[in-house]
Image (cartoon, rainbow, N blue to C red):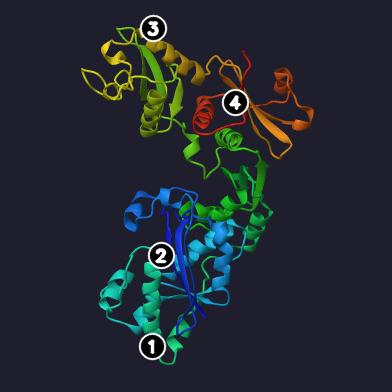
Amino acid sequence: MYAIVDIETTGGKFNEEGITEIAIYRHDGYQIVDQFISLVNPERPIQAFVVSLTGINNSMLRQAPKFYEVAKRIVEITQDAVLVAHNAQFDYRVLRTEFDRLGYDFERKTLCTVELSKKLLPGHASYSLGKLVRALGIPISDRHRAQGDALATVKLFQMLMDRDIEKSIVQSSIRIDPKKQIEPKLLELIEQAPSEIGVYYLRNSEGKLIYIGKSKNIKKRLNQHFTGQDRKSKKLQLETADVQVERTGNELIALLKESEEIKLHKPLYNRSLRRSLFRYQLTHFTDEQGYINLKVEPSDRRKKSITTFTTFAQAKSVLFKITDQHGLCQKLNSLYQSKEACFLYSLEQCRGACIGEETPDEYNQRVREFIAKNQYQSSDLLIIDKGRHLEERSCILIEKGAFKGFGYYSLNFQIQNPEVLKSIIRPMQDNRDAQHIIQSYLRRHKVLKVLNLND
């Protein structure tokens, strides 16, 4: 029995792709006896070049089932069957990676129609699916879509089976993938890791820290490290002897812990977080007409910033949103170059500060409201979010704009007094990277509550 499969993915880094579409035809060697075709929500964005190639975009997949919702059907239709694909190594690796993320060991024999075609149909200029089936007169529709490519592979496979009269070449080409074998010691480390959010520490046989990371799912992330084929992954596979884990309950604390620990310990295989996390900042100044202007500029520690950004594109995108949400002027915020009114004025979305129709006092009131809400240089704040279990909450303390640390408290005690909350804070270093992490996280994510202690 054979399961002929084609998979479309998001693209991206090796072993970090997500499946966007899958088609499987169960074949008894003579005809199709079952089939499964579905879009899949990969829970991650699709690379732009893949959208152009396949026509599958993010909006098409929002309502599609997630992989765990179709996993049982995939197991059933491929049970006791040889997995057949054109470049089987790719499809099988992606499938196994998805199942690994679910903690399920998906193992099938494989048969590659590229390899089989080279043996049974020698002499072709190209063995890519599109060019090969055209050369053989096999019709193909919906190229680079799972159903179309899988059906073309079915017809190609039938032709190859007919060529191999004694079926000896087909049988000799069946493989049990030997490439994705995890060493027992690494497999044990993965099995011991929690499928929870937190920070993890990889140590070598001498107990030395070689890598620190954070993940929303530590087990899944370790699996990616220990099955990856990139240079860093291979070094971690070779050198890791022990893994330590600290659950954090939420991503913000994990990000802060990761940043501080990497700067403190400087592990061998952590490079990026040793450097500053942000390169641009949002500042403000008052122009000659008395209007407060917002401006994106390169990071400068000598200047007081409202918030910070990793890239210029990110900063500009956020400033467009700020301008729109608060009814500000694109021209004053250096987003629209003109000697006349800004573009939003023509749409009646700007009140005319750019041409003096709105007074500086009226305009600046909205700018100050935005700055007061987003700049915490002089603020005393408690950021309340999820804890490590359902009956716990986490809190992050900021005093006079300085990050002080984090702690946890039980819901059973219903702590209302901020002074009591401060007493459970675990001290951490305040630096501009920590402030950047907090500001950018609050800008992009929701937390349970932000308490202003000055109120």
Please indicate whether residue 126 sits to the left or right of residue 445 in the image.
left
Which of label 2 and label 1 is nearer to you?
2
Mark closest to the chain's N terminus, 4 or 2 = 2
Tell me the distance, in whole angstroms, between the alpha carbons under discs 4 and 1: 70 Å
Calculate the distance from the C-alpha at mark 2 to the C-alpha at mark 1: 24 Å
State the CA–CA distance, disc 4 to disc 3. 39 Å
Q: Nearer the observer, disc 3 or disc 1? A: 3
Residue 260, visible in the rendered structure: yes
Residue placed under numbered mark 3 in the picture: 361
Disc with the residue nearer the chain's start (3 vs 1): 1
Which residue position holds label 1? 162
Residue type at mark 2 is Ala
The percent position of residue 263, horizontal first and vertical second, equals 55, 33
Task: Classify 445 as above or below 200.
Answer: above
Q: Are marks 3 and 1 in contact (CB under 8 Å)?
A: no
Residue depth check, mark 4 versus mark 1: number of the one nearer the observer = 1
In the drawing, does residue 293 fall left or right of residue 266? left
User: Which of the image's four quarters has the C terminus?
Assistant: top right
- Give how far across and how far down residue 252 sits, in percent: 58, 34
What kind of element bears circle 3?
A: helix
Which kind of residue does numbered mark 1 sit on?
Answer: Asp
Label 1 packing within 10 angstroms: few (<14), some (14-19), many (20+): few
Marks 4 and 2 in Cβ contact (< 8 Å): no
Sequence order check, earlier mark of 4 and 1: 1
Q: Residue 146, which numbered label?
A: 2
What residue did someone put label 4 on? Answer: 429
In this rendering, the answer to whether 325 lies above or below 90 is above
Quarter assignment of residue 197: top right
Choose the circle earlier in sequence order: 2 or 3: 2
Kindly identify the residue that appears in the image at 36 percent across and 24 percent down: 296
Tell me the SS state at disc 1: helix
